[in-house]
Image (tube, helix red, strand yellow):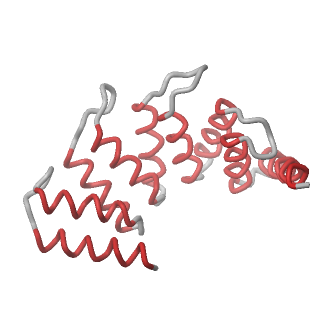
């Protein structure tokens, strides 16, 4: 029964995404293709839906397009540069996960997105402002260790407290 319900949900999301341009439905349909719920798992289809919805203003879809670009799959190699582009668009749209994911790319670094601690801090702080507890925790750690910023134990403690408050709320 659940499978039929998921298939029906996918049909409704497809109709309201493609027919009515409802971005929440596009995001939901892309997610369904991303995980294979109610439709066959198809990351290329999910990416296409996410990118289209992102172009139309869905910051959630921008974030999810970034997640797909960050993941290698049989038909497409991961592209951290493209992932960063979509995470940046999500962050600019006020999406806390987009900011956090962008900060993580700068924390880790890669051949296409070099490690950049000041940018990692910038986007960790932005994700924290938007309510992402791990953005606060990452920024707290950076202030505590002086990683990409001058050491500031007071600021580190303030951000740590905010992270705990967000986790517990």
- Quadrant assignment for the N terminus: bottom right
Whether residue 79 is situated above or below residue 137 in the rendered picture: above
In the image, taking residue 69 as reference, residue 34 lies left or right, namely right
- Where does the image place residue 68, in percent across and percent down from the top left? 55, 37
The spot of residue 103 in percent (x, y) is: 33, 49
* Location of residue 12 with respect to 131 vertically, above or below: above
Which image quarter: residue 126? bottom left
Left or right, 96 with reference to 106: right
Residue at 54% in and 46% down: 62
The number of callouts visible is 0
Of 51 and 150, nearer the camera is: 150
Spot the residue most to the top: 75
Q: Is residue 133 above or below residue 30?
A: below
State the residue at coordinates (24%, 37%): 115
Residue 128 higher or lower than 25, as above or below: below
- Asked if residue 132 lies left or right of residue 74, the reply is left
13 or 158: nearer the viewer:
158
Q: Give the residue furthest to the front.
A: 1
Q: Residue at x 34, y 46 (%)?
A: 104
Q: Position of residue 132 (x, y in %)?
A: 41, 64
Residue placed at 70% from the left, 32% from the top? 42
At which x and y percent is residue 61? 59, 48
Q: Is residue 150 left or right of residue 24?
A: left
């Amino acid at each position: 029964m659940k499978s039929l319900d998921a298939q029906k949900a996918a049909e409704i999301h497809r109709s309201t995404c493609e027919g009515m341009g409802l971005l929440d439905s596009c995001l939901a349909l892309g997610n369904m293709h991303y995980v294979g719920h109610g439709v066959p798992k198809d990351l290329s289809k999910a990416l296409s839906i996410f990118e289209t919805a992102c172009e139309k203003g869905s910051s959630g879809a921008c974030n999810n397009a970034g997640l797909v670009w960050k993941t290698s799959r049989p038909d497409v190699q991961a592209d951290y540069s493209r992932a960063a582009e979509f995470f940046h668009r999500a962050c600019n749209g006020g999406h806390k996960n987009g900011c956090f994911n962008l900060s993580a790319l700068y924390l880790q670094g890669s051949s296409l997105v070099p490690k950049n601690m000041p940018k990692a801090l910038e986007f960790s702080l932005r994700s924290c402002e938007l309510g992402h507890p791990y953005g606060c925790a990452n920024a707290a750690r950076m202030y505590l260790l002086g990683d990409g910023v001058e050491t500031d134990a007071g600021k580190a403690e303030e951000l740590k407290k905010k992270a705990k408050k967000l986790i517990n709320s």
